[in-house]
Image: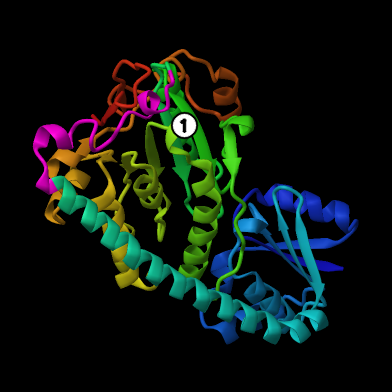
Amino acid sequence: MKIVLLVLSGDPEQASEWLQKKYPGADIEPISRGELEGPALGRIRSLHSLRPDIFAVATERLAWQSGQNDLLLFGALAGARRVLLIDAGGNSRAETSLGVVIRTPFRFARESVLSAMAIARSRAGLKRLEQAVKSRANVERSISPTVREGSARYPNSQESAGVDSARTRIAYLRSTPGVGTQAGGAATHINGFVNAATELGAEIRVISNDYLAGIDRTKLTLIDPEPLGSTRAAFDLRNNLIFSAGAMPEIEPASIDLIYQRYARFSWVGVAASLRTGRPLFLEYNGSEVWMGRHWDRGEMLPLLDRFERLNLEAAARIFVVADVERRNLLRSGILDEKIVVNPNGVDTEKFRPGVGGFAARRELGVAERVGERELRIELAPFSPRPESSARLFRR
């Protein structure tokens, strides 16, 4: 038996081990995405030439893997007798090629209908939120600066609820739709903010569409996604509706002081929660998804994405960026300077410093104990338990 394995995300070795246990003695041949690039017919021929009995696709989490019906059909048309989708959590979806071919027309029809409904609902909801944000902005411009910055704009939830507490209570929203985001840079960034804010005395409740490495699951509210969408944009829009519907009941005005959200494609949950509760939205903005769509990943529905992005930026009371260049980008797009906070990324020098360890790993990898001073010099700023701690790298 021959298994052709395509790893979209996650650990290739873990996927191979899972398949070996499931199909003892099978010949497993890994392939990369690059081997299946090009026109659809060419990709089918490439896979067919490998003569797989089973076409297996591995991803980090099936719940976030869009295009599953396309992957199943791709394997079936390429001649595999069975198509298998697996993820790092041990979840799987297996079908015979005959079953895939029979079910595909009904699946695509259903997915198309659900996608069209999600797009229509998103357009209508976006229009309502745009009007609400504009109305709020008009009201704020009509009152004095003192009142605008005071309790009339953002009433203290602790006082209004009769709670005697000095702790700032934050609803942290993470709605980034996509596989491969449970660990890595984004998760590290989230942990850095959550841990630093907690050390400063804040009480944080994380609401996310997935579990995150390093975040205590008992302190996280999970809103399960659904892997349906005829296009990437439709997938994102539909899951924005799902996430918003699940998150909104979790955000009560009496239990939070502010809303903090990592900006995400086609997401409006932070804006909607801010309007409903009267609490300010603090937006972590790591770059323009519209720019990415135009210059990097050939994004879909860019005019609609631009409206979503503008909605978030205009509704936010504060916008946090990690570099001054992003601040200048926002200023050029018409965002008020007073709303923007440049908050550079930082390094915890208690964990990352010379002499902290790693000698065994360096010996195993054949890395020298010392790096020549002329090659690289690292200067780390002192770490404090504040999000604004930073580090600088200098090459010489």
**Residue depicted at x 52% and y 65%:** 238
Indicate the quadrant where residue 151 lies: top left
Image x and y of residue 240, in percent: 48, 59
**Residue depicted at x 73% and y 58%:** 86
Image x and y of residue 52, in percent: 78, 73
Indicate the quadrant where residue 267 lies: bottom left
Looking at the image, residue 279 sits to the left or right of residue 8; the answer is left
* Vertical comparison of 327 with 113: above or below: above
Q: Is residue 325 magenta?
A: no
* Vertical comparison of 169 with 175: above or below: above
Q: Give the residue type that dot 1 points to.
A: Ser
Q: Is residue 117 visible?
A: yes
**Residue depicted at x 64% and y 57%:** 63
**Residue depicted at x 82% and y 83%:** 98
Span highlighted in magenta in the image: 141-163
Image x and y of residue 89, in percent: 72, 47
- Decide: few, some or many residues near mark 1? Use Cα within 10 Å; few <14, some 14-19, many ≥20: some
Looking at the image, residue 257 sits to the left or right of residue 396; the answer is right
Q: Is residue 161 magenta?
A: yes
* Vertical comparison of 35 with 360: above or below: below
